[in-house]
């Protein structure tokens, strides 16, 4: 199990060069802190290389994030943004548009998806770097919810407590009800065991690592105060 929350709000902001209040003072067109949106960066790629994330063409991840990283939430001006990513010498991802909503979070996930058969070339990798966005969604007060996501593979069968679930790549599967714990197994082996202390919205992302083993990374999508 991997659960990395080491990139703080101010750590992400410092990557942009200033806190939101300082940037707002320097540029009146930037909304004040109350208009900030939450942004989380996740590296769920089958590679040992670090991944750099670009927002509107600007690097917001320093030297890049390590595989399995699910960073803490940083505050960014709300509005429409375009994200790309790159990893080592491999081709960068195609751009994706993301709506950053005031007071809400969105996670941008980097992974390696399959190259369409018609685009494959001899001697070239059959997977390419790609991005997707996971917006925050409201849940009933006091409940726990687990959103399961598979990236980089077309399908994956897992066992979630007493349920057998067939995940489809790129589609969110929500565990119903208000479970107090989740044990997820792949091929009979526990991949993730999670028992939240408090109710909340938990996202678990499944993928194969660079060695081909099934792994997961997870985070709690809690509301941040900016």
Image (spheres, rainbow, N blue to C red):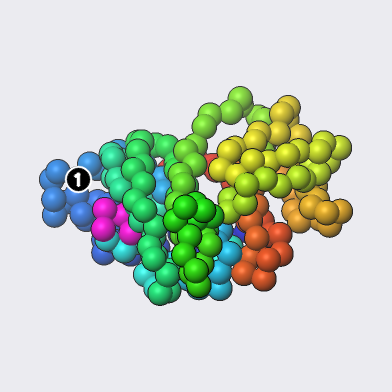
Front residue of 218 and 114: 114
* Left or right: 154 as drawn, with respect to 35: right
The one nearer the camera, 141 or 96, is 96
Q: Does residue 144 sit above or below 157 in this rendering?
A: above
Q: Is residue 82 left or right of residue 165?
A: left
Q: How many marks?
A: 1
What is the quadrant of the N terminus in the image? bottom right
Quadrant the C terminus occupies: top left
SS class of the residue under badge 1? loop
Q: State the image quarter where residue 91 is shown.
A: bottom left
Is residue 139 visible in the rendered structure shown here? yes
Q: Circle 1 is placed at which residue position? A: 30
The spot of residue 90 in percent (x, y) is 42, 70
Q: Is residue 34 visible?
A: no
Q: Badge 1, how many Cα within 10 Å: few under 14, some, many 20+? A: some
Residue at 13%, 45% in the rendered image: 28
Residue beneath the point at 28% across and 39% down = 79
User: Which of these two is toward me, 123 or 69?
Assistant: 123
Q: Residue at x 34, y 43 (%)?
A: 97
Q: Position of residue 147 (x, y in %)?
A: 63, 39
Q: Is residue 183 left or right of residue 8?
A: right
Residue shown at 68% from the left, 41% from the top: 167
Picture coordinates of residue 162, whole percent (x, y): 86, 37
Up-down: is 35 above or below 186?
above
Nearest to the observer: residue 94 or residue 71:
94
What secondary structure prevails in the magenta region? strand
Residue 130 in the magenta stretch? The answer is no
The magenta segment: 53-57
């Amino acid at each position: 199990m991997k659960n990395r929350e080491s990139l703080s709000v101010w750590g992400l902001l410092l990557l942009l060069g200033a806190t939101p209040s300082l940037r707002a003072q320097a540029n009146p067109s930037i909304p004040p802190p109350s208009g900030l949106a939450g942004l989380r960066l996740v590296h769920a790629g089958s590679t040992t290389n670090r991944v750099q994330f670009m927002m509107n063409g600007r690097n917001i991840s320093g030297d890049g994030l390590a595989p399995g990283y699910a960073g803490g939430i940083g505050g960014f001006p709300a509005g429409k943004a375009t994200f790309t990513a790159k990893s080592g010498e491999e081709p960068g991802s195609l751009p994706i548009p993301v709506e950053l909503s005031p007071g809400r979070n969105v996670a941008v996930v980097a992974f390696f998806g399959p190259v369409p058969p018609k685009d494959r070339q001899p001697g070239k990798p059959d997977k390419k770097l790609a991005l997707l966005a996971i917006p925050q969604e409201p849940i009933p007060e006091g409940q726990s919810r687990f959103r399961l996501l598979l990236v980089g593979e077309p399908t994956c069968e897992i066992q979630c407590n007493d349920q057998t679930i067939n995940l489809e790549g790129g589609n969110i599967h929500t565990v119903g009800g208000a479970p107090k714990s989740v044990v997820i197994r792949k091929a009979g082996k526990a991949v993730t065991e999670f028992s939240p202390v408090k109710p909340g919205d938990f996202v678990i992302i499944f993928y194969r690592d660079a060695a081909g083993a099934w792994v997961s990374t997870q985070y709690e999508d809690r509301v941040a105060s900016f």
